Structures are given as C-alpha cells and as structure tokens.
Amino acid sequence: MAKFENVLLIEDDSITIMVCERIITMTGFASKVKSALNGKEAIDYLEEISERKETLPDIIFLDINMPVMNGWQFLEQLETVKSKFPRLPDIYILSSTVDPEDYKKAESFPTVKSFISKPLTREHLEQINTTSV
C-alpha cells in the first residue's frame, strides 16, 4: 500500500518529471502522481479539484525556477487562495539551488516543510513522514 494517496509535482523539466514520477511509483510512495509544468497550471489544477470536491494532493514537490509562474510566485498565490481549500498540502521544495537566500525564503512559508536538493531519491522519500500530512 502506498504511503500517500496522491502527489502533485510542479516541475517544468520533462526529464526531471520522468525521474520523479518513476521514483515515486517504484518506491510505493504515492498511488497517484500528477504533474504541472508551472505554478499557474498547478494553482488552476488545485482550484479545479477543490471545486469538484475531489481530494487535494497530500504532498506537493515544487521546483523554484519555472516559466509562467515560478515556485515563489506559486507559494505567494497559494497564500491568497488558501481559504478555498479545506487544508493545504505539505510542500517540499525540490531544487538544485545552493543559494542560502532561497533556503531562508522557503522558511517564511508555513506550508513548506523542507528543501530537497535534486535529484529526488528514495532516501528523500523515506524521510517524509506520513504523520506530517
């Protein structure tokens, strides 16, 4: 049985998406993985499933650098629409950044649980606790 019901991956790189989906599936981390190519697509998806009274993702893996709406803009937008949702998923920033300012900025968002350096690995997934949801 999967650790989580569903995961949303917000990432614009097709190879990273393929690798993440494969590791999430192979490890039994989640039953379902949905990908969004940018923050705007992800906000639209979350609002759509919320309106249909479908279950929100348990976990969001969020890239920072993306076109259209980057990870920081996604987090800011999520703050403005969070009242539409019964609860917010736990968010894990998945990035290759080494900038200490990014780590500091991530801490300012209560929904961000941790910063994960790419690539996503089995070890990263094992550190995510089901009680955090």
Image: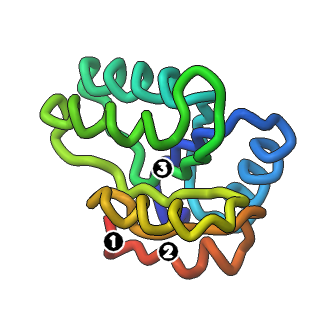
Q: Is 124 above or below relative to 79?
A: below
Q: CA distance from mark 3 to mark 2?
A: 12 Å
Q: What secondary structure is marked by label 3?
A: strand
Q: Residue 64: x percent and y percent?
A: 59, 46
* 132 to the left or right of 18: left
Q: CA distance from mark 2 to mark 1?
A: 8 Å
- Tag 2 residue: 128
- Residue at screen point 22% across, 29% down: 81
Three-letter amino acid code of the residue under disc 1: Ser
> Looking at the image, do the residues carrying marks 1 and 3 touch, with CB atoms under 8 Å apart?
no
> Looking at the image, do the residues carrying marks 2 and 1 touch, with CB atoms under 8 Å apart?
yes
Q: Quadrant of residue 10?
A: top right
Three-letter amino acid code of the residue under disc 2: Ile
Q: What secondary structure is marked by label 2?
A: loop
The numbered mark, 1 or 3, whose residue comes first in the sequence reads 3
> Looking at the image, do the residues carrying marks 3 and 2 touch, with CB atoms under 8 Å apart?
no
- Residue at screen point 44% across, 23% down: 45
